[in-house]
Image (cartoon, coloured by chain):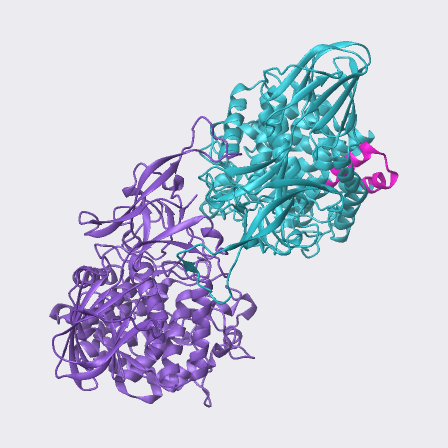
Chain colours: A cyan, B purple
Amino acid sequence: MTRNYTPVRFTAVSIDGEFWRERLDTVLARTIPSQYEQLEGNGMLASLDVPRPPPPLRIPVGEHGLSTQIFWDSDIGKWIEAASYALAHRRDAAIEERIERIVDRYERAQAPDGYLNCWYLSRDPEGRWSNLRDCHELYCAGHLLEGAIAYWQATGRRRLLDVMIRYVQHIASMFGRGPGQRRGYCGHQEIELALVKLHHATGERAYLDLAAYFIDERGSQPPHYYDVEARARGDDPAKYWFGSYEYNQSHRPVREQDKVVGHAVRAMYMYTAMADLAADLGDERLKRTCETLWRDVTRHRIYLTAGLGPAAANEGFTRDYDLPNDTAYAETCASVALIFWAQRMLNLDCDGAYADVLEQSLYNGALSGLSRDGTHYFYQNPLESDGTHGRWTWHPCPCCTMNIARLVASVGGYFYSTGRDTLAIHLYGGNTADIDLGGTRVRLQQQTAYPWDGQVRISLDPSAPARFRLRLRIPGWARSHALKLNGAPLPSAPKDRGYVEIDRTWTPGDVVELTLPMPVERVYADPRVRADVGRVALKRGPLVYCAEQVDNPDAPLDLVRLPAAARIESAARQDLLGGIVSLVAEGEVALVDPEDARLYRTARVPKRPVRLTAVPYYAWANRGSNAMQVWIAED
Amino acid sequence: MTRNYTPVRFTAVSIDGEFWRERLDTVLARTIPSQYEQLEGNGMLASLDVPRPPPPLRIPVGEHGLSTQIFWDSDIGKWIEAASYALAHRRDAAIEERIERIVDRYERAQAPDGYLNCWYLSRDPEGRWSNLRDCHELYCAGHLLEGAIAYWQATGRRRLLDVMIRYVQHIASMFGRGPGQRRGYCGHQEIELALVKLHHATGERAYLDLAAYFIDERGSQPPHYYDVEARARGDDPAKYWFGSYEYNQSHRPVREQDKVVGHAVRAMYMYTAMADLAADLGDERLKRTCETLWRDVTRHRIYLTAGLGPAAANEGFTRDYDLPNDTAYAETCASVALIFWAQRMLNLDCDGAYADVLEQSLYNGALSGLSRDGTHYFYQNPLESDGTHGRWTWHPCPCCTMNIARLVASVGGYFYSTGRDTLAIHLYGGNTADIDLGGTRVRLQQQTAYPWDGQVRISLDPSAPARFRLRLRIPGWARSHALKLNGAPLPSAPKDRGYVEIDRTWTPGDVVELTLPMPVERVYADPRVRADVGRVALKRGPLVYCAEQVDNPDAPLDLVRLPAAARIESAARQDLLGGIVSLVAEGEVALVDPEDARLYRTARVPKRPVRLTAVPYYAWANRGSNAMQVWIAED
């Protein structure tokens, strides 16, 4: 088995539809520059200068004796990656100059043997590789490596890539099953997927093998590497602060895992690498493991918004159907990383089930992490708030900021894939793509107001008439669809794993029109999801909606009810949030009598009608912190 | 203002009704003896021998650097109290012998100046009184004092009382506003209410004054005593492990408190003492503070079962309407202590609102803490369980075991009060009481199957014809009632604060018959209680019901629904749990299709009918750990 489909790179996709164009412009113009200012203003760039003795910590150690400052290399790497995606859109000498100066610092900091972790180099040079479980050295290396690859691909400048390849070679010398090597792997998975990227970028097999080693070695026992390592540094492994290696998915060998557990971002990064390796190594068993884990998370452990991980304690997973709304952790990074994993799974077989989740995350749980103004963020993405959950401009652990920036800056890369004689369209949205399909260049243009409207006009201009299958995703949320080819209705054909195919010889000027009706839908959770019992959520197309207090001044959200028979209509609102489709419903408000404050009574309290307005979930908390609900009591 | 009503002591009330007789017999025959074995087997009695150096800790220190072993004096004190109540029912030489040997140990351990805390005496004699905030010395003294009073009252033996009075005199010399005294008070309130008991038992005013000092001094600032004390022992007050003095209700002066906050048991013990002091000192302001706090807790922060304190983190209160069911902490001790407070409030004015909560706790959240066999316990009393919450035989912090034992052993003391020319009946249940009403002896007998049935026959036999008001509580849960006097219906009279009064000259052989219809009631929570939205609970009379998985093998509880129109009937079941009235309802089970495992869908899943059985909440988990729900999705 190999990967049957190849994503079309974002550099070949020019986003011109309003929805993503606005967000992309904001990220390029505001998010990426403002993040640089944060890196500089928070001392993160200065930390690369490896002084001895090191300056006092800027971020104090937390309850587990660690400072998030230990991850700073990863944050810088992720910013370089996002900034490089910006450069790929349009070269910018000022940004390149900034990155070059960072590269200077990394060049200077790198140890003669290639080692390059600025935290350890400045604070504990002898302690390197002594605590893979907690200290994120390989995780940092992975993010820096992703940044270096992106920068090289965007600009042709490979100085940072060379630095990182030297570092990777050092890593490859340290870890493995050879004599004198350590059988370690990182407590926070990331380097595995970065090594696959390096393999794809360079063609060098050794990087793939190193990624495979990290995946295969993970969780093998006895002895467990983190036990060995803890004893070597004089710690008692039994005193591991989290208690279980489920936290970092090393509780058992990776191929034997069948439940999605532990820290959500670690899990998603690992599964991404596993899907990559399954494809690149033709490893059917690893593919089946991925499929088992995919089924587990999507059937038992995912929010409607594609948020992942209900619990703050482990930033991750708990029990099946445990999906509390107000305390949902649902880290932005986890939803972004789910998109990475979904894309890898999608490109194995082009099964729309993966694209459905990719889209679900993209428009909801991931995008909610970024404000409209491009400079405010969520780390947690709860599905309900009493008004105390607000967006921030920076965070002691700013991982989410650069994750959502790099996603949006490269969003065009999730729209299309090519397979053998096949061009697959996964996402809809206005864009113009130049796609190489086995030697034929195809210019494809989508004209649509998606996600606000389900009318999509797709024009295809092959450089010469060419026969190929156009594979059009029919989203899982669509109850029906209609297709026209050059103005004539196409009879409905059975779907193949969520896609309809048009197999013909395409000529310049061909036009396919797809209609995906977008009624407002009531959504119910599995009855075992305790938090959603008696509650309904509203969706339209790919968007999950929420009621925000600011739109409903007469309806305290904790008293709002949406009767099962209530009419709900959609309404285009150019005046709201830069132009959205809102929902308007005939709701009710429970009447609480201040004179009769009984907490329990034998009759339901009376209600009065109220007009309820809902807005897309991704857009909430852009008008100040205020109460919000995705799941509304249906009553 | 003084206390207008005086409770009739439990020693004057002979319980003969089936419900309480069975529980009382179990506590006397099994609970109290088995608890002694636990005290002995767990090394708690040996800890009184004050060896130096002390033996290793049996209970290791926890996350805040403290061991629950520090409270052992309180556990022993509470056992002496419970055992003394048993002796008041029937003298027992073996139990007295055991208590006498404990008294020997305390006599030997007591320091020449009267100080008596076995933990400090054996482990840190110089450290006494250095950490009132965390170390429970005065709390332990309070419980030992309650035990000493009860033992003296039951047996006339006052050796332990004398020991404790010496200790109290030492305490009075150490704490207060005089020169050289410390202006401290205990981090865990308890001694205040014990000192009021000592005042009542001895008539000595100084004990009341000391209780009033502890209440009045609490929370006064600046400086805050716990800040002063922390600095004196070299600690930084800002590093207090809980962060806020709300935890122990010393965040502001007691009279200025208007929200029920912090650790629930501490709060309830404090409010109990406040209500006592309000009565004994005629302190109207303190009474109003109590009333404000009572309104707050009953309107915003109490479970249907009268459980208190949703959170494990502080064993206490969080936010208004935050009443999660599955994670409810609802410590048994807190519900028991609520009964103490409610009784004090009730005896101020005989307002049935207090008796309603007293009864609600007695039959539900407090009684659930004790198993049918009398030797298994709950510390937490959640209102929902997935089957993982079970009863235990002992606990590193066994406070709840002796609390429920002393409550049940003295349950007769909550049935009646006397006021000026008034005899008030607060609780119904078979018993025979000999009551002194201003010199007239009244023998009162209740014949009833309460709480299973609402027919109560009350016969009154005054020693001579006597005029007094009989004040009969009409429970808040009763929608109607009917009264007969000597077989003739009494016209309905307006209720006075939840009671009807019959003012007449009573003669031997008079019989009052009270009928309280007990239909099954659906109960709904305030719409702001998020955890109960779309859910219904079932009550009948004073009892809250729950569905337990063991009675519903065909209905997985997480899939159970109870339609709003479903018929629910009561059914006497002699075969269940020693004889109960169960409820039987026409419920439904959501059908989850193992082939279609979508977590979210646009239609509710279909349902099949199922016969649901519910049992009284207090009786759950007596047939092994299994899933349970009080609040059932109504759907």
In the rendered image, residue A193 lying in the magenta stretch gets the answer no
Asked if residue B24 is positioned above or below residue B269 in the image, the reply reads above
Query: Nearest the camera: B560 or A2?
Result: B560
- Observer able to see residue A138: no
User: Is A85 a magenta residue?
Assistant: yes
Residue closer to the observer: A448 or B487: B487
Q: Quadrant of residue B336?
A: bottom left
What percent of the width, then of the height, locates residue A43? Answer: 74, 52
Q: Which residues are magenta?
A: A79-100
Q: Identify the residue at the far right of this view.
A: A93
Name the residue at the bottom extreme: B179
**Where residue B117 sits: x, y (%)?**
33, 74
Q: Position of residue B511 (x, y in %)?
A: 16, 72
> Residue A175's x, y, as percent?
59, 32
Quadrant for residue A340, please give it.
top right
Q: Nearer the viewer, residue B108 or A177?
A: B108
Q: In the displayed structure, does residue A629 sit left or right of residue B144?
A: right
A257 versus A536 height, above or below: above
B228 relative to B122 in the view: left or right: right
Q: Main secondary structure of the magenta part?
A: helix
Taking the image as drawn, is residue A303 in sight?
yes
A527 lies above or below B167: above
Q: Quadrant of the C terminus of chain B?
A: top left
Asked which quadrant contains residue A631, the reply is top right
Q: What residue is shown at x 21% (from left), y 73% (from top)? A: B10
* Quarter of the rendering occupied by the N terminus of chain B: bottom left
